Amino acid sequence: MADSKLVDDLQTETGKTREECEAALNAANGDYNTAKASLNLYKPSGVDVDAGGDVYIADTNNHRVRRAPS
């Protein structure tokens, strides 16, 4: 279960519902920055992983590539 304070902070920063924030934190194993990045994706269109385990996400409508470190 996600930490309530982190859920509240995420909800304030992103404007997403409590349920969306809890799900994002649970999927990110409690990592706030990873959860926040996942909530801010806009039309992700591709994903890749480098040899070191870092994940790169093509965030199409935000015109950037997001990196989630391993």
Image: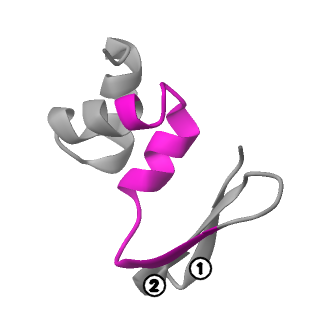
Instruction: Tell me if residue 64 comes above or below residue 12 in the rendering.
Output: below
Q: Which mark is residue 51?
A: none
- Provide residue 54's location: percent of width, then percent of height: 72, 54
The kind of residue on which mark 2 rests is Thr
The residue at 19%/33% (across/down) is: 18
Residue 28 belongs to magenta span: yes
- The answer to which of 20 and 70 lies nearer the viewer is 70
Residue 30 in the figure: left or right of residue 43: right
Instruction: Tell me if residue 59 comes above or below residue 60 in the rendering.
Output: above
Instruction: Tell me if residue 18 comes above or below residue 41 in the rendering.
Output: above
- In 3D space, how far apart are the residues under numbered discs 2 and 1 (Cα atoms)? 7 Å
The residue at 34%/48% (across/down) is: 14
- Provide residue 62's location: percent of width, then percent of height: 47, 79
The image quadrant that residue 19 belongs to is: top left
The kind of residue on which mark 1 rests is Arg
- Provide residue 50's location: percent of width, then percent of height: 76, 64
Residue 59 in the figure: left or right of residue 43: right
The residue at 45%/84% (across/down) is: 60
Residue 35 belongs to magenta span: yes
Which span of residues is magenta-colored? 26-48
Task: Please say which color scheme the image uses.
Answer: one colour
- Provide residue 6's location: percent of width, then percent of height: 41, 22
* Count of labels in the image: 2
Instruction: Tell me if residue 3 comes above or below residue 53 in the rendering.
Output: above
- In contact (CB < 8 Å): disc 2 and disc 1: no
Residue that badge 1 annotates: 64
Name the secondary structure under disc 1. Answer: strand
Quarter of the image for the N terminus: give it: top left
Residue that badge 2 annotates: 60
Name the secondary structure under disc 2. Answer: helix
